[in-house]
Amino acid sequence: MAGVITPTAAYARDVSVTWWYTASSILFLHAFAAVTWTIGVFAEGTPTVLVLNLLGVAGSLASAVLLLVRYRREPLDDADVIARRPVWPLVVSGIVAAAAMGLSTGSLLLGVGFAAQTLCLVRWRAGVRVRLAVLSIVVIVAVWLIEVTRLQPQGYAQVFALPFFVALLPPLTATSLWWWDIVRELDRARRAEGRLAAAQERLRLAGDLHDLQGHHLQVIALQLELAEKMMTRDPEAAAQQVRAARVSVDDARRGTRDLAARFRGVPLPDELANAADLLRAAGLTVDLIVDVSADRAPADVLGPVVRESTTNVLKHGGGVSASLSLVRQDGAWVLVVENDSRAATVPVSDGAGLSGIAERVGALGGVMDATRLDDRFRLTVRVPEEVAA
């Protein structure tokens, strides 16, 4: 239903809000400390020193932004992420910018504090960030004491104000990102629990379907066998058994429809996640993009499309990668399933699967487009947003 926010969508929104709050807080503290210290350079520094300081502030802030962007995108459980991904250019840029800020202000504490914060913005292996934060506090305190000894007693006040704030940047950054990792881990656990619940429900439905069809098929077989034996001796009784078999067929069909209705109750995001897991289990590299409000998409329409498309990828693809995406665009839900294929010469056919998808979508005012681009096959399904979920 339009305008209704499901618990899953609300939780995903809350997780996103938590990230933006965390990142904006880190950047605000970073910018506040840098700009506040720069004010003193404007008042007392030469043009050369001022330019050096501004370059340092801009470079440090840009490095922090880019490191935070990378931090959110990196996986939680990849132990070799630092070794494999070129994060060090950003780290080096941030440290160089921090050094420029320290040189322009004549404060070793400023340079060390911002350099330590840059290191805290990296996704380290488990336990490294805590040790790094503790080490940075020790180093900053030592540098702080060195700067205090260079000041006259009347300068003590200024070294316990803004420098204290700068000294807190690394531990505050490490703590904030540690908290974000906990929130993200909880969100991942929630998603995994949802997929597991959906898988368990499917197994239960499969068992129910097996029992239902097995029972009815056995009854139908017995009724038809009895009708065959009675055909010559008592045609009327044989016809009665045939009619009973027909009733059993109707019962089986009705029971199957009821089970299918329960199966369609699986949320569409879980359908997509299960499809991605199935393709990954088959050895494909899968990219999955799901709109945060995908729970409001019509699962009765798009769910069968997802299952049919996944089957086609496994049966006819033969490639190594695939992508699934469901987004809301221009008043419609757009589902795109794309995969590479070694069988690039096979034409796009109007088989029963694609024809069934086209008919199902077209009946609701939607459209389906199946195209081949070089060695990639893309299926795009667009359904009006007002279609009931």
Image (cartoon, rainbow, N blue to C red):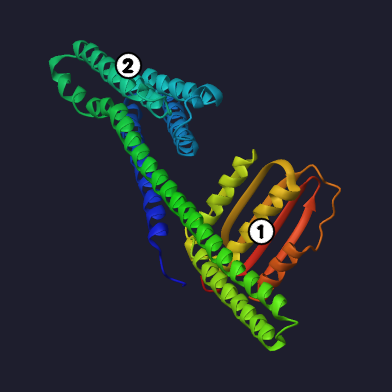
Disc assigned to residue 308: 1
Residue occupying image coordinates x 33% and y 41%? 25
* Residue 280 locus on image (x, y percent): 60, 41
Disc assigned to residue 226: none
Q: Are marks 1 and 2 in contact (CB under 8 Å)?
A: no
Front residue of 236 and 378? 236
* Above or below, comparing residue 117 to residue 329 in the picture: above
Visible residue check, residue 270: yes
* Residue 229 locus on image (x, y percent): 71, 76
**Element under label 2?**
helix
Residue occupying image coordinates x 40% and y 26%? 118
Front residue of 309 and 179? 309
* Residue 330 locus on image (x, y percent): 59, 66
Residue occupying image coordinates x 32% and y 38%? 179
Question: In the rendered structure, which amino acid carries the disc numbered 1?
Answer: Glu
Depth check, mark 1 against mark 2: the one in front is 1
Question: In the rendered structure, which amino acid carries the disc numbered 2?
Answer: Leu
Q: Which residue lies furthest to the bottom in this view?
A: 236
Snapshot quadrant of residue 184: top left
Report the number of numbered marks: 2
Mark 2, residue position:
108
**Element under label 1?**
helix
Front residue of 258 and 297? 258
Visible residue check, residue 39: no
* Badge 1 density bin: few <14, some 14–19, many ≥20, Cα 10 Å: some
Mark with earlier residue (1, 2): 2
* Residue 1 locus on image (x, y percent): 46, 72
* Above or below, comparing residue 152 to residue 246 in the picture: above
* Badge 2 density bin: few <14, some 14–19, many ≥20, Cα 10 Å: some
